[in-house]
Image (tube, rainbow, N blue to C red):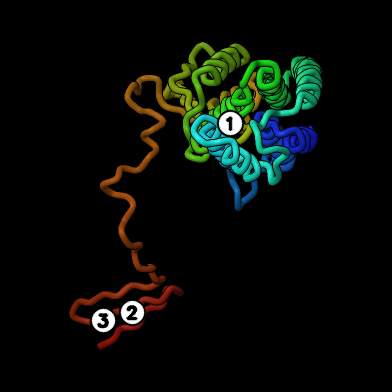
Amino acid sequence: MAVAKGVGGYMFNSQSMIADAWHSLTDLASDILTLATVSWSLKPPTAMFPTGFGKVESLGSLGVSGMLLFGGCFMCLNSCEILYAHFFLDAQAVAEVAMHAHGHSHSHGEITPSIHAAWLAAGTVLLKEWLYQATMKVAKERKSSVLASNAIHHRVDSLTGIVTLFAILGANFLHEAAWLDPVGGLLISLLVIKAGWGNTVSALYELADKSIDSEIKASVTRAAKKSFANLREGSQVELREVEGVKSGQNYLVDLQLAVPKSWTVEDVREVEETVREVVGSKVRGVRRVKVRFIPKDDTTTSLFNEFISSDISPRESPEPEEHDHDHDHEDGHSHANGNGNGKKIQ
C-alpha cells in the first residue's frame, strides 16, 4: 500500500499522497521492526543481561521514531517550498519547484494533482479502516495491547488518507485551489512529526528507566493485596510501596512489604512466592517481581534507601588490590604468606 501511494503520488503530482505514502512506509517499518524485536524482548534473562532483553524493543522504537521525524520534517519542508512557490513566484518558478519535488513536470502552469489520485486515496481509506476493525476485534479477543496499538496505527493511516482525499478533491474542483494539495501534505507531515516526537520521548523515557505509570501501579497494588488473602496470616502483611520500570513490553516491579519482626525467613519466603505468582498472573506484562521486607514498626524506610549515598560512593579511583598477605612494619618485619606460614625477618 505504501508503494502504491508513493507511485500514485509521484505520477499524479500529489504532495499529500506522497506524504501519506511516507507515513504508511514508516508504519510498515514499525511493524517489521516490532516483529523483529518482540522475539528478542521476550527472551529469558541471562548472566550478561540479568534484567532481560526488553530494552531491545525500546531501541527499535527509537529507530522507528527517528524515521518518522526525518520523513515528517522532509515532507514538511517540501510542502512549504511548493506553497511558497505557489503564492510568491511566477508560473515558471512554480513548475521548477514541482520538477524539483517530483523529478519531472507535466506542464508549466499551475500544478494540480490528478483526479485519479482521489480514487487511490479513497481505496486506501476503506482498506485501512477495514484493517483497523479486524485487528481491533482480534486484539479485544486476545486482550493484546500490542495488537491494539497496531490497530490504532491503521486508524491513523485511514484518517491521514481522508485528509489526502479532501486535499486532492479540493484542488481539482475549487477554483484556483491547487494550493490545497501541498496544504494537505503539510498537515499530514505535521501529524507524522507529532507521532514521531511522541514515540521518541516514550522510547527515551523507557531507556532512561522512567517509573511505571499510575495505572500499572494501581493494578499491581490491587493484585498484591488480593494475594494476601491466600496466606495463612495475610492480615499481618502490609503493602508499603510499589515502584517499577518499563522494559519494552515488560514491567519490572519492586514491592516493599511490612511484616511482624518475629517472622522467620520461611514465613517471608511464602509471602514472596505467593505475591509474585498472583501479581504475575493478574497484571499483564509484569515479567519480574522483587519483594523487599521491613518490620512493621519501621515507618521511615523506602525503596529508594537502597541507593548508596553520594558522599561515600562512587570513589574516584578503586582501591588497590589487596593481596593475600600482610606486612607488619614494627621493630621486626614479619611476612605472612597466604598458606599460613610465617617467617621472621631480623
Left or right of 180, for residue 114 = right
> Please, which residue is most extreme toward the left here?
331
Q: Residue at x 33, y 72 (%)?
A: 326
Disc 2: which residue: 335
Q: Neighbour class for label 3 at 10 Å: few (<14), some, many (≥20)? A: few
Q: Which mark is residue 333?
A: 3
Disc 1: which residue: 189
Left or right of 70, for residue 24 = right
| Closer mark to the observer between disc 2 and disc 1 | 1
- Tell which of 78 and 231 is nearer to you: 78
Which secondary structure, mark 1? Answer: helix
Amino acid type at circle 1 is Ser
Q: Residue at x 69, y 22 (%)?
A: 168
Is disc 2 in contact with disc 3, using a CB cutoff of under 8 Å?
A: yes
In the rendered image, residue 171, in percent from the top left (x then y), is placed at 66, 21
- Tell which of 148 and 279 is nearer to you: 148
Q: How many circles with numbers are drawn on the protein?
A: 3
In the rendered image, residue 165, in percent from the top left (x then y), is placed at 71, 20
Taking the image as drawn, is residue 71 in sight?
no
Q: Determine the CA span between mark 2 and mark 3.
A: 7 Å
Left or right of 53, for residue 139 = right
Amino acid type at circle 2 is His
Q: Residue at x 25, y 88 (%)?
A: 346
In the rendered image, residue 110, in percent from the top left (x then y), is placed at 64, 31
Is disc 2 in contact with disc 1, using a CB cutoff of under 8 Å?
A: no
Marks 3 and 1, the one that precedes in the sequence: 1
